[in-house]
Amino acid sequence: MNLYDLTLHEAHEKISKKEISSKELLDVTFRRIDDIENKVNSYITLSKDKAYRDAEVIDAKIAKGEKISDLAGIPMAVKDNICTKDVRTTCGSKMLESFVPPYNGEAYERLLKEGAVMIGKTNMDEFAMGSTTENSYYKLTKNPWNLKMVPGGSSGGSAAAVASGEAFYALGSDTGGSIRQPATFCGVVGFKPTYGAVSRYGTVAYAPSLEQVGVLTKDVSDCAIILNHLYGYDEKDSTTLNVKHDNFKNVLKEDIKDLRIGLPKELYSDGIDSEVKDSIKRALKVLESMGAYIEETNLPHSEYALPVYYIVALSEASSSLARFDGIRYGFKADEYKDIDDMYIKSRSGGFGKEAKQRIIFGTHALIDSNYASYYDKALRVRRLIKEDYDRAFKKYDLLITPTYPTAAFKIGEESNELALYMADLCTVPVNVAGVPAMSVPCGFTDAGMPMGMQIIGKHLGEAKIIRAAYVYEKGTNHSKKRPSL
């Protein structure tokens, strides 16, 4: 096995035993980037000099016999909507092409304090608006399993970097599936924690009441390790929860005999591809053979999740992105007649088509004459959707669905924007309800493309998700496979 194919915990073991130094691991990773980045296009910005400085610090600690964290010295990537001090943060947009933050986002800062070595900022759909990473201003990221396919989005660069061996793990953000869907397309593990469990301070949010920072990893164990460091209260983020949690590594046990799993029939619709359905059926048989109790259930308001999500998300995007006007933040037009003309030209020139479209829709939903009919009503229905999940978790420990209705599709193939929006039917309700969910690889299509299973837990129920995913992973070999580039 190539060193760049190691998991985080395997790499940590080698560094701890002094079989390899952090610098040598970084050398391997950058050689991999040199070899394939021109094919995959995972990164917008690389921070090579900073990475080597950070690696030297870790190697010096090891040489002195100091104890190091389970993240120390291991190369990782950060989605380009999470602020990184002195390293450009663009959100995949021309609007922030020259923005260099003076501070770190809290999620990255917590990993940095544990000795994580950031090698670069990953490509993404502009301001996290998209599900293919085709909406980036900078480049088109490709799926490492087949370079003709999309990697998913909006965290497509992070997923592609992890899958291709250009990073050992990556941070992403998830507003309606933007971690889980690209994880599925690229054959990696993607985890969206409970809303408020991980700080969003320093993350440029698309829709603040829906968005959550999370991780993309090569296996479930790595996910548990990283979550230990991310999870918990942050005084700089008023939405974070002041709760204690167990060490997530302690739940990595091969025992799920006490787990009750529900299958929401509304999320197994006719729109799910037959190969995806078959892969989920096989996965459920594995879990059942290991002792889990599984039965069908229902989430009666699921049909409203997509319209609720898009009304809330686009309304919040309209508000959140209002500050990018050429004066407070962002791209500023060179020529203009007056201040109104400057606003118009700066925002028109700085934002791409998808961002402008979503801002317009969101603004329309928020005007006085529409607010009660759209945004206010969406919030009321959102409560009903959350109550469906609350009721389900009184009976079940977990819910399982496909992560996405299909495997990855060809670049440029899906031009129907409504169809792309509708395909989020399994991931979006999780964000609307604010509960945690993980996508774990569960098979491959006949064409060799990965597929994913989504495991959903109750509020702050990350531990049971990790346990079930770990048991499933140990019973299969899907997560061990790597694309050949």
Image (tube, rainbow, N blue to C red):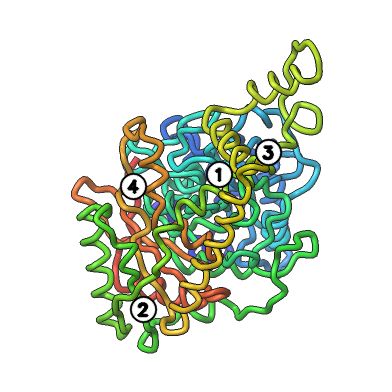
Q: Is residue 57 visible?
A: no
Residue in view at x 56 percent, y 49 percent: 374
Q: CA distance from mark 4 to mark 1?
A: 21 Å
The image's mark for residue 321 is 3
The image's mark for residue 261 is 2
Q: Earlier in the sequence, mark 4 or mark 3?
A: 3
Residue in view at x 24 percent, y 62 percent: 279
The image's mark for residue 27 is 1
Q: Earlier in the sequence, mark 4 or mark 2?
A: 2
Q: Residue 227 is drawn in which quadrant? A: bottom right
Say which element carries label 2.
strand
Q: CA distance from mark 3 to mark 2?
A: 39 Å
Q: Earlier in the sequence, mark 3 or mark 2?
A: 2
Amino acid type, mark 4: Pro
Residue in view at x 33 percent, y 64 percent: 266
Say which element carries label 3.
helix
Q: Nearer the viewer, mark 4 or mark 3?
A: 3
Q: Nearer the viewer, mark 1 or mark 3?
A: 3
Say which element carries label 4.
loop
Q: Earlier in the sequence, mark 4 or mark 1?
A: 1
The image's mark for residue 483 is 4
Q: Residues within 10 Å of mark 1 (few under 14, many from 20)?
A: some
Compared with residue 189, is residue 311 higher up or lower down, i.e. above or below? above
Amino acid type, mark 2: Ile
Q: Are marks 4 and 2 in contact (CB under 8 Å)?
A: no
Q: Residue 110 is drawn in which quadrant? A: bottom right
Q: CA distance from mark 4 to mark 2?
A: 31 Å
**What x and y, as percent, mark residue 304?**
44, 57
